[in-house]
Amino acid sequence: MKKVGFVQNDPLFGEVERNVARALELASKVEADLLVFPELFNTGYLFLSKEEVSKLAEDLEGYTVSELRKFAEDTSTALIAGFAERDGDKFYNSAVVIDENGDVKGVYRKTHLFFEEKLFFEPGDTGFRVFHVAGMRVGVMICYDWRFPEAARTLALKGAQVIAHPSNLVLPFAPTVDLARAVENRVYIILSDRSGVEERGGKRFEYEGRSLVVDPGMKVLVQAPKEGEHAMVAEVDPKLADNKKINELNDVFGDRRPEFYEGLC
Ligand code: ACM
């Protein structure tokens, strides 16, 4: 059995040191093998210009990843966290994957950009990736990727037992839709959303919170409320996700008929 969970924070826009410290303070209140932090957990979400992204984006040697690595090593906790990634003169809405020894295993760069993210970030070029951390196979998708069932399906077909879903949800659907993604793929999903309200430059986003861990049978193991900051953990058995059988005659992957799914790709 493994302990997996999420941090649900309410970052202040641009206050990276404060936001990282607060998220790690929340994380230190629980014991886990794997914790997922929200999308852009360190900067906040509501960027108004590419110049702002440029000021706050970091590479894998930067402050945020260094702090996460120290925490991961000190507590033997694998971490997956959303941040604005700088790669040369390009910016990505990314999630870094750090193993329980504090080593960076890689990044996932958000495939489906939402709304004005399209003005500030490059579309992700990594594709959907599965990482081996804390004795589990963990795939990553970011926020609006939820609207494309192909994202979770691709990760599950690549062998993910757990899908980490860092988010900044501005629509109410994902805490429900992720339950369907879990049961149709027979995987665990860790949805890590932020809470609170951001108002900048005449724009306003209210975030959904309601982070959760759901099992391959669609049972919600833990869930945060919409409001407030929380760290929560559930016990999971990743091997359950390797078994796609739902009875002696049905296997939800074995029963697929891709020859009739023309038009999907
Ligand atoms: C979103 O993709 N952050 C809504």
Image (cartoon, rainbow, N blue to C red):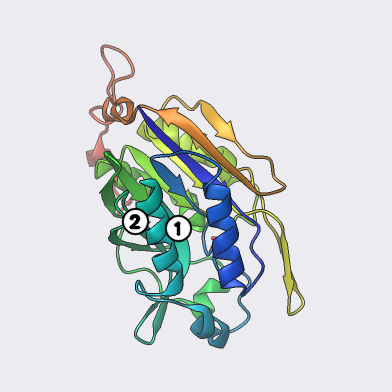
Note whether residue 215 is visible: no
Q: CA distance from mark 2 to mark 1?
A: 9 Å
Q: Quadrant of the N terminus?
A: top left
Tell me which label, 2 or 1, sits earlier in the chain. 1
Give amino acid for label 2: Ile
Q: Quadrant of residue 96?
A: bottom left
Is residue 185 shown above or below 53? Answer: above
Residue at 29% in and 26% down: 244
Q: Position of residue 241 (x, y in %)?
A: 32, 30
Residue at 22% in and 40% down: 259
Q: Quadrant of the C terminus?
A: bottom left
Q: Viewed as shown, does residue 204 lie left or right of 187?
A: right
- Residue behind mark 1: 81
Residue at 59% in and 84% down: 49
Q: Position of residue 169 (x, y in %)?
A: 60, 55
Is residue 31 shown above or below 97? Answer: above
Of marks 2 and 1, the one in the foreground: 2
74 or 143, nearer to the observer = 74
Mark drawn on residue 98: 2
Tell me, yes or no, whether the two marked residues, 2 and 1, touch with CB atoms within 8 Å. yes
Q: Position of residue 18 (x, y in %)?
A: 61, 67
Residue at 52% in and 28% down: 221
Structural crowding at the residue carrying mark 1, measured as other residues with C-alpha within 10 Å and reported as few (<14), some (14–19) or many (≥20): many
48 or 222, nearer to the observer = 222
